[in-house]
Image: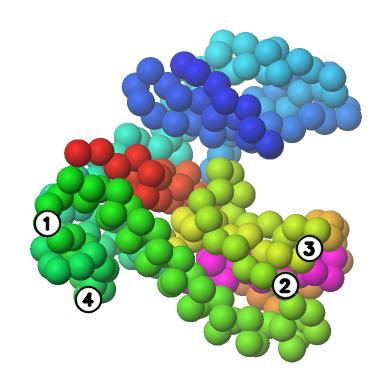
Amino acid sequence: MTQHLEGDWLELSTTGGSTIRVQKASHPRARRLRLTVTPKGARVSYPHGTHPAQVSAFLRSHADWLEKKLDELNLIVKPLPPLRVGHPAEFPLRGEVRMLDWAEGPYPRVEPHDDGLTLVIPRPHTRALPVARGLLASYFESQIRRDVSRWLAAYVPQLGLAPTALRIRPLKSLWGSLDTRDRINLDLALALAPPAALRYVLAHELCHLKVRSHSPRFWAQVETIFPHWREQRDWLRQNGAMLKAELDRLIADVAD
């Protein structure tokens, strides 16, 4: 089992090929390392000043227990089959299971249809997978931008503030962020989620234009413009690891 520390998360790759994401947090009143598992995921808390190596060693010693508990809650990301040229594959899109298939044509493009997407790739197929990956990334971004532009038209007048830019790209652990220049960053994997989940993340980041913290005043602002935020936050917590793994398969970990 290997560990990778990044931000507020610790990612563990098991010998079976699964990925476990553990939220890590130091706590001012913590006296020892503590590992908890809930339907929201795994969390390790530790006293201030704990060395990262101690946290990793602690998780290693509880690896079997952790994997068992997460598997019971269906929170472990199972290895996904690689994307292969000419082989249809199921994938999530806007919260629904869709089919990805392939066709030949004079120029590369994505053709949406009722059942999913068709990737049209011209011959020769020497660069088919990188082309397919780029087509899917561009298509997912266009879907997010289409939705966001419609919702911004309603939210900006309510808030009296607007972001200076919108950037969409794969994010490791976050779903979105607002930087110091008031630019909103959104995770490309949100194109795979139900539109309501994407809308929650947008509303969340827009409210940071008014309140930069996660104080009660911030959540009251979120409640004002998006009353169903709790349901969508919980959905992302339960399904987020799967979505990020699916995005990685479709646009990054493609193999012949």
Asked whether the residues under the numbered discs 3 and 2 touch, taking CB atoms below 8 Å apart as contact, a structural biologist would say yes
Element at label 1: loop
* Cα–Cα span, label 4 and label 2: 35 Å
Q: Position of residue 188 (x, y in %)?
A: 49, 58
- Residue sitting at x 56%, y 81%: 149
Mark 3 or mark 4, earlier in chain: 4
* Predominant SS of the magenta segment: helix
- Residue sitting at x 79%, y 79%: 161
Considering only vertical position in the picture, is 50 above or below 117?
A: above
- Residue sitting at x 21%, y 50%: 128
The residue that label 2 is drawn on is: 164
Q: Nearer the viewer, residue 146 or 159?
A: 146
Asked whether the residues under the numbered discs 3 and 4 touch, taking CB atoms below 8 Å apart as contact, a structural biologist would say no
Residue 139: name its quadrant.
bottom left
Give the side of residue 27 with respect to residue 125, left or right: right
The residue that label 1 is drawn on is: 123
Q: Is residue 132 visible?
A: yes
For the residue marked with disc 2, what is the amino acid? Thr
Q: Nearer the viewer, residue 182 or 148?
A: 182
Mark 1 or mark 3, earlier in chain: 1
Mark 4 or mark 2, earlier in chain: 4
Element at label 4: loop
The residue that label 4 is drawn on is: 114
For the residue marked with disc 3, what is the amino acid? Arg
Q: Residues within 10 Å of mark 4 (few under 14, many from 20)?
A: few
Q: Position of residue 122 (x, y in %)?
A: 15, 61
The residue that label 3 is drawn on is: 181
For the residue marked with disc 4, what is the amino acid? Asp
In the rendered structure, which segment of residues is drawn in magenta? 194-211
* Cα–Cα span, label 1 and label 3: 44 Å
